[in-house]
Amino acid sequence: MNYRIGVDIGGTSIKIGVVDDNFKICEKAAIPTLTEHGSDAIVFDIIDTCKRLAANYPIVGIGIGSAGAIDPVNGMILGAGNLPFKNEPIAARVSKSLGGLPVIIDNDANCALIGEHAAGVCRDFDDVIMLTIGTGIGGAIMIGGKIYRGNNFRAGELGHFTIDIHGEKCECGLYGCYEHYASAKALVKMTLRAAKAAPDSLLANYSKSGLDGKTAFTAAAAGCPIAREVLSEYGRMLSVGINSILKVFRPDIIVLSGSIAREGKTLLDYISPWLLPDAVVKTTLLDGDGGLIGASLLAKPYNDYI
């Protein structure tokens, strides 16, 4: 049995685990992402945790998934938004500290898709698109069983194609980007508008205790027609991007992950009426562990995904 370490670097926490040949997580740890202490502190914490886990297993390699712009060839995090990385040679640093073990790095969305392809809902398909729905919308593209990275490794920014040329300007420079209409943040805005317009509704009542991406789902499950209208419109907005992706790529399946996708079948029920007849859309089976499992599979001998 071979064992690999997977590292999933998030904005608030880092998940690190040992994964075996059967894609089972044998041991897992979570540590806070101490962004305020800088990149060195984060790398040192990752190294320390990897060393502790490696002491208990014959580790053959380490894979790291991180948000941001990644150079997998040179093992670098070029930049990562809310993470303090800038041209960080993290793969070389981790490898050196763990006795020269091979270390490979990739974008976190790519890792999530790799994990799902190996052990999740799309394991029987080789042409797959993943949409990660959170504060924004990200994604990953798999063609013929290989991750497509594009020029400068920046492919997969599926939240940034225009669906409204008259929409507001996005920080990426385009106007009316998909994520402005179909992200969890967009759903929160839709929920807030509806709650204000119907102050006596159950949705408005639920919103008083704090509003997030789950509020509309909770109110709808309790029978609120206003919340159901919000989710129907949100499902329509999500479907606009999904149908466009289907037309461009014709994948076998589109997989939804991220915080909103945790609503599972309920989410799909609101999307399905708007989808093209031949669309195959499912939510992730691996939930929060997909990125960790996928990162581990970057390490040999499963690095055919690179």
Image (spheres, helix red, strand yellow):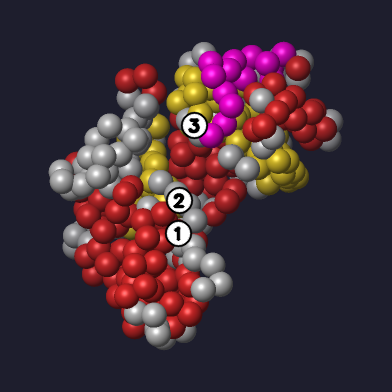
**Residue shown at 45% from the left, 49% from the top:** 135
Q: Where does residue 269 sit, x and y in percent of width and height?
A: 34, 71
Three-letter residue code for mark 1: Ile
Q: Which residue is mark 2?
A: 134
Q: What range is drawn magenta here?
A: 82-96
**Magenta-drawn stretch contains 95:** yes
Few, some or many residues within 10 Å of mark 2 (<14, 14–19, 20+): some
| Mark 3 or mark 1, earlier in chain | 3
| Mark 2 or mark 3, earlier in chain | 3
Do tag 2 and tag 3 residues touch (Cβ < 8 Å)?
A: no
Does the rendering let one see residue 22?
no
Is 149 in front, or is 180? 180
Q: Which callout, 3 or 1, points to the residue nearer the camera? A: 3
Three-letter residue code for mark 2: Gly
Q: Which residue is mark 1?
A: 260
Q: Which callout, 2 or 3, points to the residue nearer the camera? A: 3
Q: In which quarter of the view is residue 151 placed?
A: top left
Three-letter residue code for mark 3: Gly
**Residue shown at 32% from the left, 75% from the top:** 197
Q: Which residue is mark 3?
A: 81
Tell how many labels: 3
Locate residue 20 relative to residue 191 in the image: left or right: right
Separation of disc 3 and disc 1 at Cα?
21 Å
